[in-house]
Image: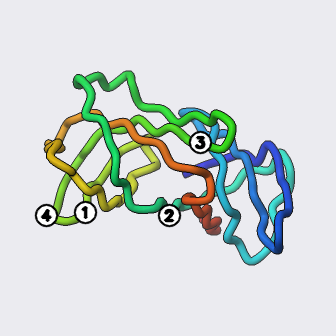
Amino acid sequence: MRIIITSIENMKNNIIVNCSTNIGILKGFWKGKNSPFLNSVYHVEFTLADIDCIDVLPKNKEDISVSLKNDAVFFNGICEDYDGEIHYIRFAYDWLQMIYIEENGEKINIGDNISFKLNYIQIEIYPYDIS
């Protein structure tokens, strides 16, 4: 996933970044070996905490997004696959996220749109080099 760092803050030996993606803004803990630079482009992978509360939405491929409100990050994606334990959720052409989702009675089918939120402290951002 390609991101642009839009803000950086240091908190108790952790680096917290806001980043812009092609589907919206999110916030999380920077897990790179080196500190990020403001307004720089990075390719990253995300680790998201397990999801225990989701909403299954009407199918609508236009409704893929990520947004930030205070410390909450709101995700809307499409379930592309399920291997019996892990859901594969598509957020962008270059962002397929593997997530454990506790279904709690609401079945998620392949092709379903889902919506959930996490606190930014549940999101880790790992940069990688594509060269």
Disc 1 secondary structure class: loop
**Residues under labels 3 and 2: Cα distance?**
16 Å
Q: Are marks 3 and 4 in contact (CB under 8 Å)?
A: no
Disc 4 secondary structure class: loop
Question: In the rendered structure, which disc, 2 or 4, sits on the residue that comes first in sequence?
Answer: 2
Give the residue type at disc 3.
Ala
Residue at which label 1 appears: 86
Give the residue type at disc 4.
Gly
Q: Quadrant of residue 71?
A: top right
**Residues under labels 3 and 4: Cα distance?**
28 Å
80 left or right of 72?
left
Q: Residue at x 82, y 46 (%)?
A: 7
Q: Are marks 1 and 4 in contact (CB under 8 Å)?
A: no
As drawn, the label of residue 84 is 4
Residue at which label 3 appears: 72
* Percent coordinates x, y for residue 40 in the rendering: 80, 50
Task: Say which of 121 and 79 sits in front.
Answer: 121
122 left or right of 100?
right
Dot 2: few (<14), some (14–19), or many (≥20) neighbours within 10 Å?
some
**Residues under labels 1 and 3: Cα distance?**
23 Å
Task: Say which of 120 and 130 sits in front.
Answer: 120
**Residues under labels 1 and 4: Cα distance?**
6 Å
